[in-house]
Image (tube, rainbow, N blue to C red):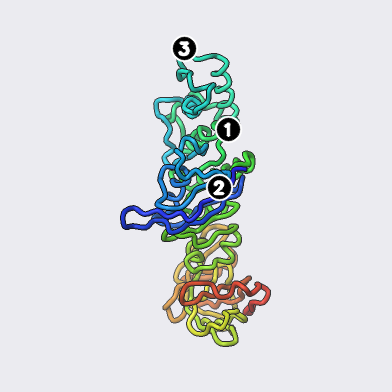
Amino acid sequence: MTAISLSAIEKSFGATRVLEGINLDIADGEFLTLVGPSGCGKSTLLRILAGLEAPTSGRVEIGGRDVTNVRPAHRNLAMVFQSYALYPHLTVAQNMMTPLKLRDLSMVQRLPFLGPLMARGAYRAILGQVEDTAKILKIDHLLDRKPGQLSGGQRQRAALGRAMVRKPVAFLMDEPLSNLDAALRIHMRSELAELHRSLKTTFVYVTHDQAEALTMSDRMAVMMDGNILQLGAPDEIYNNPRDIRVAEFVGAPKINLLPGTLDEAGHARCGEMVLARAAANGVVGCVTLGLRPEHLALCDRGASESLSGRVAHKENLGADIYLHVSVLDGAQRLVVRVSPVEGAEISIGETRSFHRLHGQAMVFGKDGKRLDLAVPASEVAEVA
């Protein structure tokens, strides 16, 4: 078993606390993503797991073994960096062979790297392993090229191949796709997910891009200010954020956050729009109502229990159109997803009304914590 456990991990750089008591268990073979804005501590946590940083306090275990003070080379982890870190003067094959040469294995340890005295049997074994890995990554035809002759996606595959040949207990990836263009990033997301399924090895992935976390992860840990705010499956994080900061960070376009009030009967109200049974556990007063763009739909102008506003901007993405609507006398901006057919009939500057909540809207208290998690979606009123 190669499960990973981080217990009470704290890290400070001088007087600045970067991590505050992180507890995290990663299952064997899991794809877990650490996601959050820049400066939240996700890369520092990954470096502590890799052994490149020492925690100020806490414990790191891999496969039940305490490795807190074990050197990086002896943790049997493979790390893939944002910059690829390929040797520019070596071919792809030579780059992929490098960890096997440097590794503390009796077969490789005494062999000069690609020198005339290299034992043929050992070299063939290493080359065979490199070629097998290259075939999996579909770069076997690039083994004789140097990094300068490769595209960004090919370099990323070569960096992955160099990590894979070691057969590590886990892969640690620090924003490996951030240097790629948008189309290639989307393509590489699916390739990484497929690679994880075929290798059945633990992946710990760091990114600031919530789309990467949602599309690839078995679980994702949303980090901010040195803490894990929420840990769970992507669907759970998206549909049931426990904190308003998680709700804002996950999802594109961002969730609509509107001021509202909550009465003693548990009805949350924003303007004329009402949500029934918010289950706020006795909380009354000012709240924040969260509505994702897909939770709203067009309705007849002036319909009861609806929000009306002026369409300020139309964002056409082909399959969807996002309307940016000024509501509550222009004090708030609402983003609504509509179909291309609906969007074609709407002009910038006209006033439209919206209602019909699909699924469960979200109610957050003054402290930013979710108030209505206990209410099933079927019990939330669909305003029509």
Circle 2: element type: strand
Residue 138's tag is 1
The residue under the point 52% across, 37% down is 76
The three-letter amino acid code for the residue at tag 2 is Ile
Sequence-first tag of 1 and 3: 3
Considering depth in this image, is 299 or 73 the residue closer to the camera?
A: 73
- Relative placement, left or right, of 56 versus 250 is left
Few, some or many residues within 10 Å of mark 3 (<14, 14–19, 20+): few
Q: Which residue is mark 3?
A: 116
Mark 2–mark 1 distance (CA, rounded to whole Å): 30 Å
Residue 15's tag is none
Q: Which residue is mark 2?
A: 4
Considering depth in this image, is 234 or 320 the residue closer to the camera?
A: 234
Q: Is residue 220 above or below residue 335?
A: above
Circle 1: element type: loop
Sequence-first tag of 2 and 1: 2
Q: Nearer the viewer, mark 2 or mark 3?
A: 2
